[in-house]
Image (cartoon, coloured by chain):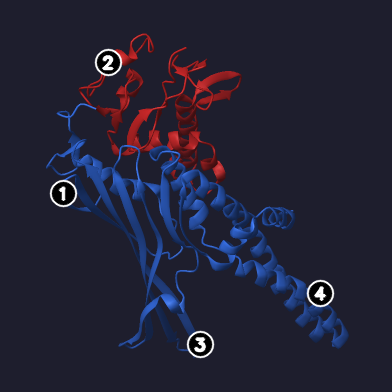
Chain colours: A blue, B red
Amino acid sequence: MSLISAYRAYSSLTGEQKSILKEKTIDGSRTVAEWIALLGGVARYDGAADPLRQGVGCLSAIGFLLAFIAGVATGSFVLFIVVVVATVPFLILYGSLRRSDISNLLREFVLPLLALMREDMSAEAPLHLKLDLGKGMTDAKRTDQKPLPGPRTIVQSSYRNGWMEGDGTLTDGSTLAWSIVDLIRERKVTRRNPRGKTKTKVKYKVRRMIDMRIGLRRDDYLLAGTAPKGGGNERIDVKSGEKRNVLRVRRVVESADPDAILDLDDFIGPLAAAYRRVALNNAEEK
Amino acid sequence: MAACAVKRGIITLRDCGEEGINTCSVCSRPVCAEHTRMESGELLCVECYAKRQEDARASEKAATKSRGATAKSPARRQDDDTWEDPSWAYGYRHHYYGSYGYQPFYHGHYYDSYYDQYDVRSFDATDSTAAEGDQSDAGGFYDS
């Protein structure tokens, strides 16, 4: 069933959506509704393909295991070949599904965020988005790799994955620009136990940095000058301009899972923190 | 009929701007077609509908917790397709204001007491005459 739904979802994609699956990067300006229409189809395909990929991967592994058992148990080379040949289509399908796999952040963070942005941006306002939906730990994103001294063999790799940038104007005239970068530290620890068996463990530490720049019009908002109440752990820098007060907010979210989904609260939090720092400029009648 | 009473926005609230063609059976406010939901034969505004959904999720979460299992917080459900329904954003808003005590700003002319629960911050100089005759239960324009 998931094969049919994945096929249907893929068939309904436009050329541009298929190209997003292939390239895994997006950079452009559209209205929020247009972004939702474009990325929604891609997300629906990814949602249908994910369970299918897992199922096909399992079937491929089982097929090769059966081929090995058939070959050894019966000693029949012909049976071995038949089972291998029967497994190959699954392997090809698995490879194809893997190549078109994109980060789950699209359907579990980006699209819900766009659904919220739809409320805070006017229908005609353009939103600039730059997304990298590929894997976070690739050679291109590796910034450092070194062995660590110690009794065990430890190789530490660092990655920098900037997977989202965006900017636009909110309905109250405020400007919002943000970027989200994952700094991933991977430690591969290899040790040999007394029986001579070698074991490798991989540990991750992820620092997800959410940076925002919010420009609030001085005609509408005054700096309150007090620390935000009920805010999170964000750092806020304020720069007063002639027309706007610009607040730079950074929130850091730490995790041990490089594939962790960013909670929307951790995105809305820094934005809300900026608005907590200001009061309405009642001197200016609207 | 009066203007739709539903306020758009998450960080700042503003008037919907459409004409109300239905009346919410819970809050009795006028509501436009886009912000109307039908549940069990009842016409609801999208905000009352979203609150019901959130409360149902909260009860479900409490029940799951009492069974000893772990569950995601109600509004953290980003992993299904519920965001596609515009009411999802209103549910999230209700969750965020309630969980973090955020007081949204209101930029508009048709404030009503429905939003007093969120301690909305609004302009003192809002044009109160604009609401006359449109909102039978229109509240104050000041911080509640």
Q: Nearer the viewer, residue A185 or A196?
A: A185
Element class at badge 1: loop
Q: Classify mark 3: helix, strand or loop.
A: loop
> In this rendering, would A80 be left or right of B79?
right
Q: Pointer 2 indicates a residue of which chain? A: B
Q: Which mark is residue A86?
A: 4
Determine crowd level at label 3: few under 14, some 14-19, many 20+ residues with C-alpha closer than 10 A: few
Classify mark 4: residues with Cα within 10 Å, few (<14), some (14-19) or many (20+). Answer: some
Label 1 belongs to which residue? A241
Tell me the kind of residue under disc 4. Ala
**Among the two numbered marks 4 and 1 on one chain, the one whose residue lies closer to the N terminus:** 4
Q: Nearer the viewer, residue B57 or A133?
A: A133
- Residue B27 is situated, as x and y percent measured from the top left of the image, at 43, 17
Q: Position of residue B30 (x, y in %)?
A: 46, 16
Kind of residue indicated by mark 3: Lys
Tell me the CA gap for discs 3 and 4: 35 Å
Marks 2/1 in contact by CB < 8 Å: the verdict is no
Sooner in the amino-acid sequence: mark 3 or mark 1: 3
Which residue is depicted at the point 46% across and 57% down? A28
Cα–Cα span, label 2 and label 1: 32 Å
Q: Secondary structure at mark 4?
A: helix
Q: Residue at x 37, y 8 (%)?
A: B133
Q: Residue at x 33, y 18 (%)?
A: B112
- Residue B29 against residue A66 in the figure, above or below: above
Closer to the eye: label 4 or 2? 2
What amino acid type is highlighted by mark number 2? Ser
